[in-house]
Image (cartoon, rainbow, N blue to C red):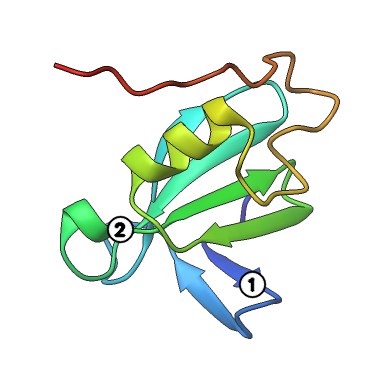
Amino acid sequence: MISRSLLLADQGGAYPFFPSEGGLLKWGKDPGASFYWLTRGEPEEWPVVVDYRDEVWELHNMPTSRFLCEVLSGQLDTSIVYGPLFTQRPVQVSEVDG
């Protein structure tokens, strides 16, 4: 079970859950991972936090749109998202002239 205050070792500090200021707001889940926004700054700039079974946490200092593009294209620097519980393989993303 997730505690009300999370320790992200690489950040050296704890983050509370939303609605606390600067808290984590969950926006997605799969069988092994949960996805959060770190609610600091403007909403369109909120970084993404990924949690793998409350054991491994990653902070991706980018907005959600960029995070999802990097996940889908296989460009995201992560040890969680492409793990064994993720069955989705990266897809080729190309620009469309228009």
Q: Position of residue 46 (x, y in %)?
A: 30, 58
Mark identifier at residue 46: 2
Q: Residue at x 78, y 48 (%)?
A: 79
Instruction: Tell me, yes or no, if residue 1 can be seen here.
Output: no
Type of amino acid at the residue the image marks with label 2: Trp
Q: Position of residue 23 (x, y in %)?
A: 36, 64
Bin the neighbour count of mark 2 within 10 Å (Cα to Cα): few under 14, some 14-19, many 20 and up. Answer: some
Bin the neighbour count of mark 1 within 10 Å (Cα to Cα): few under 14, some 14-19, many 20 and up. Answer: few
94 relative to 18, above or below:
above
Q: Quadrant of residue 39?
A: bottom left
Q: Disc 2 and disc 1: Cα gap in Å?
A: 18 Å
Q: Position of residue 32 (x, y in %)?
A: 72, 29
Front residue of 40/81: it is: 81
Residue wearing tag 1? 7
Determine whether label 2 and label 1 are within 8 Å by CB: no
Q: Quadrant of the C terminus?
A: top left
Q: Quadrant of residue 72?
A: top right
Task: Look at the numbered disc 1 and give the secondary structure of its residue.
Answer: strand
Q: Quadrant of the N terminus?
A: top right
Q: Position of residue 56 (x, y in %)?
A: 76, 54
- For the image, the number of numbered tags is 2
Would you say 91 lies left or right of 35 here?
right
Mark identifier at residue 73: none
Q: Residue at x 28, y 17 (%)?
A: 96
Going from the N terminus, do you reach mark 2 or mark 1 first?
1
Q: Residue at x 45, y 63 (%)?
A: 61
Type of amino acid at the residue the image marks with label 1: Leu
Instruction: Tell me, yes or no, if residue 84 can be seen here.
Output: yes
Would you say 57 lies left or right of 18 here?
right
Would you say 79 lies left or right of 62 here?
right
Circle 2 or circle 1, nearest the eye: 2
Task: Look at the numbered disc 2 and give the secondary structure of its residue.
Answer: loop
